[in-house]
Amino acid sequence: MVEAPTRYSDADLAEFKEIILNKIHKAQFDLDLIKSAYMNDLNNGTDDTSPTFKAFEEGSESMSKEANSQLAIRQEKFIRDLKNALFRVENKTYGVCRVTGKLISKDRLKIVPHATMSIEAKNLQR
């Protein structure tokens, strides 16, 4: 009987590392956009618009800042999870389900590279 592998090969880990690094880069770019919108660095170009629109914009501004703040928090957590995944790649524990100890499917890891549980383990939580 052939025993199931307990970790991904170095070649697989290198491929996952590339995916994770690309996601971190994009996520950091998105976070910077969110933060610049939150800090109001970007001029919305409303200086010459009607007073009615200005009043509407100011009313929605507080909601927008709160929403942006929540988005930024979620994005920072996503980046932290990706960096943790990168750490697992480096110590060769990446892709091992923390519940079952089995390998998480490559397809799942390509879509959710920061996953720490297999679909099987996720379903057991429900």
Image (cartoon, grey):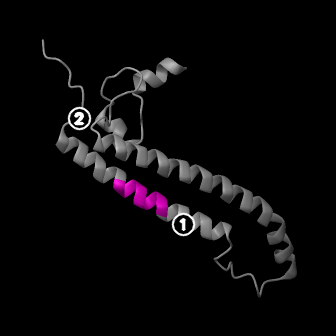
| Quadrant position of residue 13 | top left
Q: Is residue 115 magenta?
A: no
Q: CA distance from mark 1 to mark 2?
A: 33 Å
Q: Is residue 119 left or right of residue 89?
A: right
Q: Residue at x 38, y 43 (%)?
A: 85
The amino acid marked with disc number 1 is: Asp
The amino acid marked with disc number 2 is: Tyr
Mark closest to the chain's N terminus, 1 or 2: 2
Q: Secondary structure at mark 1?
A: helix
| Quadrant position of residue 84 | top left
Q: Quadrant of the N terminus?
A: top left
On the image, the x and y values in percent for residue 106 come to 29, 36
Which residue is under mark 1?
32
Q: Residue at x 68, y 78 (%)?
A: 44
Up-down relation of residue 101 to residue 30 (above or below): above
Range of magenta residues: 21-28
Residue lying furthest bottom in this view?
48
